[in-house]
Each structure stands twice: as C-alpha cells, then as structure tokens.
Image (spheres, grey):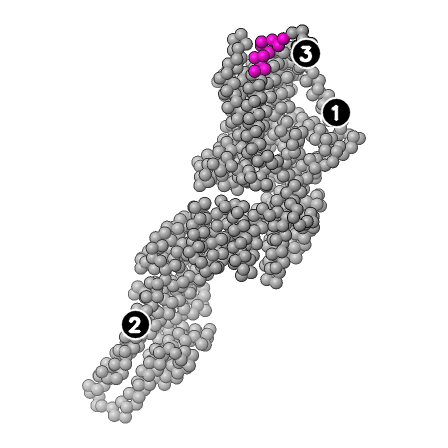
Amino acid sequence: MADVSLKEAALIVGVVAACYWNSLFCGFVFDDVSAILDNKDLHPSTPLKNLFQNDFWGTPMSEERSHKSYRPLTVLTFRLNYLFSELNAVSYHFLNLVFHGVVCIVFLKVCKLFLDKRSSVIASLLFAVHPIHTEAVTGVVGRAELLSSIFFLAAFLSYTKSKGPDNTIVWTPIAVTVLLVAVATLCKEQGITVVGICCVYEVFIAQGYTLPVLLDTAVQILRGKGSIPFSMLQTLLKLIVLMFSTLLLVVVRVQVIQSQLPVFTRFDNPAAVSPSPARQLTFNYLLPVNAWLLLNPSELCCDWTMGTIPLVESLLDVRNVATLTFFCFLGSLIVFSLRYPGDSSKTVLMALCLIVLPFIPASNLFFPVGFVVAERVLYVPSMGFCILVAHGWKKLSNKSVLRKLSWVCLTVVLFTHALKTLHRNWDWESEYTLFMSALKVNKNNAKLWNNVGHALENEKNFERALQFFIQATQVQPDDIGAHMNVGRTYKNLNKTKEAEESYMIAKSLMPQIIPGKKYAARVAPNHLNVYINLANLIRANESRLEEADQLYRQAISMRPDFKQAYISRGELLLKMNKPLKAKEAYLRALELDRSNADLWYNLAIVYIELKDPAEALRNFNRALELNPAHKLALFNSALLMQESGDARLRPEARQRLLHYVKEEPQDANGYFNLGMLAMDDKKDTEAEAWMKKAIKLQANFRSALFNLALLYSQTAKELMALPVLEDLLRYYPDHTKGLILKGDILMNQKKDIVGAKRCFERILELDPNNVQGKHNLCVVYFEERDLIKAERCLVETLALAPHEEYIQRHLSIVRSKIASSSATEQSAPPAGGTGTGTATAAAEGKKTSFQNLNKVKNEQKATQATAEDNKGHSKSKKRTEKANMDKEETPKKSSKEIKDIEKKRVAALKRLEEIERILNGE
C-alpha cells in the first residue's frame, strides 16, 4: 500500500483551503442553532457524563422528543471548541475545514489500494471540491460526517493489514478495526457500515473470490463432493469476529435509545406515513434523486422535507422511469464487479460498496428517518462515486483518441465544482441567505418559507416575516407550525385578534382529544405548543384566566410528560393567586426534569409567595448548584438574604451580587443592591461608589438617586445630596420623600426657608393629608415667626394624626411661645436689658432644638422610606423555554434598621424634653 507523499498532501490541503476559506466567515445556521447555541452539553458547567446520556442536540435519550442521534464524541469536539472560543463561529468552521482536509488525505490513501497513483489523486481532488459536501463541511453540524469518515476510513485501512503471509490472520489490525468502528459509530451512526465494506473486501479482494467461484464451492459442499478450504475457513473466522463485534455494537446502540425509534411527523418525511404503493415507489425514486445530486450538484438545497419531492403515488408516474434506469445501471455494475475477476471489477465493487452500504441507514429501507433527502449523508457515498469517476476517466484517457478530451473534461469538472463549492459556501453565511437560496431551488417546501420568516423575525422585521409565514400556510395549508408562526408574528405586531384566530386554526388541525389516549406517534411535541401559545396570549386578559388554564390542562391531557405545559400553568396559577396549585405544577415538572435550574428557580418564587423564605432560599441554591451562572437565581437569592436581616448571610449575598454584575454588567439593579448591602454594613464610601455606578448606567434610576441622597444626608454631606435630589425631582417631580428630604436640607443646612416652603407646599398639593409634609410646613411657619399660622397648621396636622405625641408637644410649645410673646409685649423691659437677652437666648435655644427635632424626624421618616423606595427593584423573572414572568418582592426592614430607628426616636424624645425645659424657664 503506497503512502501519501508530502507533495500530494500539500496539493490536497491547498485545494481544500482554496475551496473552503470563505466558510470561516459563516455563522451558526439551521441545525447549528440547536446543536451549538442551544446545547447546554457544550458548557463546561455541564458534567461530561451528560454527553453520553443525551442525544446530539442535548436532549436526554430517554425523552420521547429525542431524535435518538447518539454522537457523544462529536459533541465532545464542540465542547472543546466552546472551551477555547465559546461561541466564536470561526473556530468551529476552521476545525471542520481541517477535518475535511484530513478525510481527503486518508481517502487518497484508500484510493491507492484500488487505483493507480494519478487516478487516486484525481479521485481525492474530486472528493475535495465536490459541492455536495458544503453542507457537511460549512454546516458545523456536518462535523459528525467528517469525524465519522476519518475513523471509518481508518478502520478500513487497519483491516486491510489483517492478512499475513501465507494467508494467515493478523489479529491486532482486526482488534484496532473493531475499536475504530466503535469510535466512528460514536461520531455518527453510519460508521458501523464499514464492517460490511470490510467483509466485502475480505471475500472479493483479499481472498480474490468471485461470485461464480463462491456459488460453485457452495454447490460442491452441499453435494458432499468436497470440503471447505482452509483459506475459506480462515475467512469465515474473520467474518464471524467482525459480525459478532458489530452485533455487540448494535445491541449497545439499541440499549442507548432504549429500544425506541424517534418520532417523526408526515411533514418531516411524507412518504414514511404514506400507504402502499406510494411509500415504496417514493423511497425507490429517492435513490436516483440522490445519484443525480452526485452527478449534477447544480441545484443544492439545505432542506428537502415536506413537499419538496411530491409523492410517487402511481406506477404510471413518469418518474418511475428514472427509478428503473437507476436500478438497471446499478445492477449491471454489480454483476460486472461480482462475476468477473480482475482489478477493474474489484475497483468497481469497492466503489459500489462505498456508495451503497453507508447510505443504507439514510435510505428508509429498514427504519424511517426525519428527512426526505439530506446532502450531508452523501459525504461517504460520494467517495465511491469519486472512485468510479476516476476509474472511468483512467479508462478513457488510456485511449489515445480520447486522451486530450478526457483531460479537458476533467479540468472543467474540477474547476466548475470548485467554483460552485466556493459560491455555495456564501449561502451558509446566515440563515436568511441559506433559506433564500433554498427557495430558489424549491418553492413547494413550507418549511423553507417558515425558516426565512424565522430569520427575519430574529432581525425584528416582523412585517416581512409575516409575509413568508402566510406564504407557508398557503403552500401547506395543514402545517400546524406555519399557522403558529403567523399567530406569534401577529402577537409581536400587537394584533392580538388576528393572532388568536391563527392559533385557533392551528389548534383545529390538532387531533381531537380522547381521554386516556396518548398522541406520541401522531403529534410532534412542538405542535403541542399551540396550546401554550394560545393560552399565553389570552391570559393577558384577566377575565380569561380560567380559559387559559383549560388550554394548559388540555395539552397535559394529550401528553402527561409535556414539561412546558406544567411550567406555563405554574406561572398562570401564580398570577391567579393559587400558589399551592402552582407548587403542584412545578413539582410535577421536576419529576420529569430534576436537572432544570429554571424549574427550581420558579419553585423558589412560589415559596416566596407562600411566605416561606427559608424554603425559597433552598430552591434558589438548588438552581445555582445546577447552573452557577443562573443570573436571576443569583440576583433574587441575594435579595432574599439581604431582606432576611441576618448579618451572617450578607457576605454570601454580596458574592452573589458580584457574580451577577459580572454576568450582567449593564444591569443597574445589581450595583444598586450592592450599594444597599454596603449601607447596611455602614460602608458608606463603598455604598456611594455602587450607587454612582448604578446611576451612571441608568440616569433616571429612582431608588438609586433617592438612596444616594439619603446616604449623603446621613453622613453629614447634606449639601452633596442637593444636586442628587435635583436630578431625582427632575425625573420624578412628584417624589414625595425626595421633596421632604430636600426641604429638610434647604431649611436646616442652606437656611433657605423659601425653598423649603415650596417643597412642603408641593407635597401638600400632591397629598393634602400627608402628615410629614404638613408638619414640616408648620415648622417653616414657626421659622418665619408666624406663630398664629404655625399654631393653626399644627392643629390641622393633629387632626390628621391625633395620636402622634410629638405633634401635640409641638403645638404646646407654639402656644406657650404665643403666651410668652404676649406677656413680653405688655411689660417690655428697657432696651439692652438682660431680660431681652435671656428671652432671645431662650428663643434661639428653642429654635435650635426645634430645627434639630425636625431634622431627626425627617431622617427617621426618610430612613423608613429607604426600603419603601426600594420596592420594585427585586426583579424575578422565569426564564423557561417559552414563557417568562416578573415577580416583585417588597424588602423587609432588617433588625439593625429597626434599632437605628428606635435610637433616633429616643433622641427625638430627649430633644422634646429639652424644648419643654426651655419653655418652662428651667
């Protein structure tokens, strides 16, 4: 077996790079979204064992919605990509390009087993540039084909070394072959078909048998005229080992899928659910369709499902001619390769094996698959096709008359194929370009119209998306998904009436509910989302909540394992103020999926509603165990710890908020709550920095502005609080507590009685019964020496709050002052007398005490207002597959805050006593 020279390898690698360099500029499209972007198995936080428990798309193999595609080693390479570059598409495409180059080089080595050096290079070059491979190479999910092919070819090359001198058996290559077959199968299922190729190679190539010789030997043995030759016994032994190992792999594979085939609908593969003879005629017609794609890859399409290829329903259909011609040509090649000895027949036989055997799993002959035609499954079969073409070219070029023409034709084919591949790569640049290119080839596939609509929808171009979705319903009127897409787009356009009508049409296409009957074989799980979407739409109307609940229960009755229905119903029940029933719904969902962090998070929200913060915190912690980066669990568990008043929990709360702002650096709420924690810990400088960060991100952040001003006022920086309060009142001119705090600072620090008066008058305009504002206005009157007006004001304030002792005392003080002033006027001492000085001093002392009292009272109220003003910033959203929900929790005062308030209350009482002593002349 000739080795591949450095020049040959360089040529192949150069051609691959020239054809696929532009694939590096493509993104994640089509199936890449599910396999890469939405697949949690790629994340380092996901245990490695999950790769061997889930399918290619990250769905547990035990779930009915799983496609049963078990390719853990391919997913492992995706995970390595993610480890080094996360979701940078360039690295994924680059690795695919490298793997394709490796396949081409290994394929060249295989070709040299059956072709001469020149023909082998030609076959490898044709394989490298063939446009049919763009789906496997440029589409990231096509890596399954690439990896499987590497080990597929390596297994075959290893087996070719199992024949020793004098036809002895070399077992080491056979053991390596079995191992490589297992690895190839773990990359993609078709890897196991290399065993069949090894068997054919052993019988017809290694041993040199032909079909007539085998038949003659069998007849002789059956007639008792001979015995089985020793060489044939050795061959049988090798084949038995191969077949037994294959059987073990099949048994393991069946165990992995738990003896369940994937569930596909008639939209995925219409022929699979069609009656005879349409099913057989259509499946047979698909064989020449695939062969034509290899011969003439001019019109390629990323999706051949639904109505792309109409069913062949009659024997009179003209397409049956193509089927008959294909089988006649294939049969003649098989007869030639099996009947006649010689190198040419051996080459044709191995080429046919590479074409036919790897295609069998996708042929629908033994089990249905989820597609009609898929270009990527032709990756390995195209190897046999390239060998046939190279072998045919060799035959033509050996004839002197056709030598020049054969070279010209070969050059044209390689050049045009390379250009087509280069051009085809650009179609995979984005989902929009991919599906629009597909529509140029096929306009009868509703899925393509839907996918273009999805691409436009992702760009928020709902008007254009709606046009494509509506066209999909016209192409396939019974496509439930298309009507759902129309409904969702109408909803995005705020046309709820039209949205509901579309959802109702989709719902009418669902099978009628029969109590106790399951619909797994008839209804795709995603089609049941019509109930979820319709319920989510109508539950916006408070009067239709029960109707929405009925829809959720209807979906559950059709599929008791429909997890999303339980999740959405739990959210609705919370909205209906039925937390106990919501808890039941979430617990049922957790029975179906205990590894879902969002479910544990939602259950925590339920326990908050049930006033059980300890259990809520335990569920938040469970969510974070499953997903340490769960943003909402980080945020809300930190708030719950903060609101508990337990100082021991504050360090952990701080760490979670720091983790949250790392995940969400543009969310001002995270910085604000870090500031509140710092205020609780009396870390004023740190609190100030966090509050400023929050305000920088969100200039109109109401709570951050107020609490920063409050922080300044409590740390003897009242004048720094004023510009912050100005910003607050510019955005929220009716902010009562901000007006109170501003008025207090203006009166006590700036001595701006007029400005303070305007603040308190504005409060009373907003709320005439505001005791705080009314009382502070009374203080302003006192400062203006208008004692009569101050008395009248305090009387009115006392009427609003008759049980407030401090108002009664202040009224007594004012009345005493009025009486004292009257007595002074009647017996005024001479100018410059000591009585005046004493009275003045007493008045000043009283004035100072009254101002201080006012300040203390304002601080007390403002402190109480801190938690109140913080209300609404405890955001709790459920991040489930389809539905979200906001939840607000009002923070509770910590025990430390309550002690601070009590201290200030005691200080206020002491000042009241001081005022009374002054007024009594003590």
Q: x, y (%) of residue 507? A: 67, 50
Q: Are the residues at dot 3 and dot 1 in contact (C-beta closer than 8 Å)?
A: no
The residue where tag 1 is placed is 324
Q: For numbered disc 2, what is the local secondary structure? A: helix
Q: Is residue 10 above or below residue 536?
A: above
Q: Nearer the viewer, residue 70 or 663?
A: 70
Residue 30 painted magenta: no
Q: Main secondary structure of the magenta part?
A: helix
Q: x, y (%) of residue 77? A: 48, 33
- Which contiguous range is marked in magenta? 227-237
Given the image, on which type of amino acid does mark 2 rest? Val
Q: Which mark is residue 576?
A: none
Given the image, on which type of amino acid does mark 1 rest? Leu
Discs 3/2, front: 3
The residue where tag 2 is placed is 906
Given the image, on which type of amino acid does mark 3 rest? Leu
Callout 2 environment at 10 Å: few (<14), some (14 to 19), or many (20+)?
few
Q: Earlier in the sequence, mark 3 or mark 2?
A: 3
Q: Residue furthest right?
A: 316
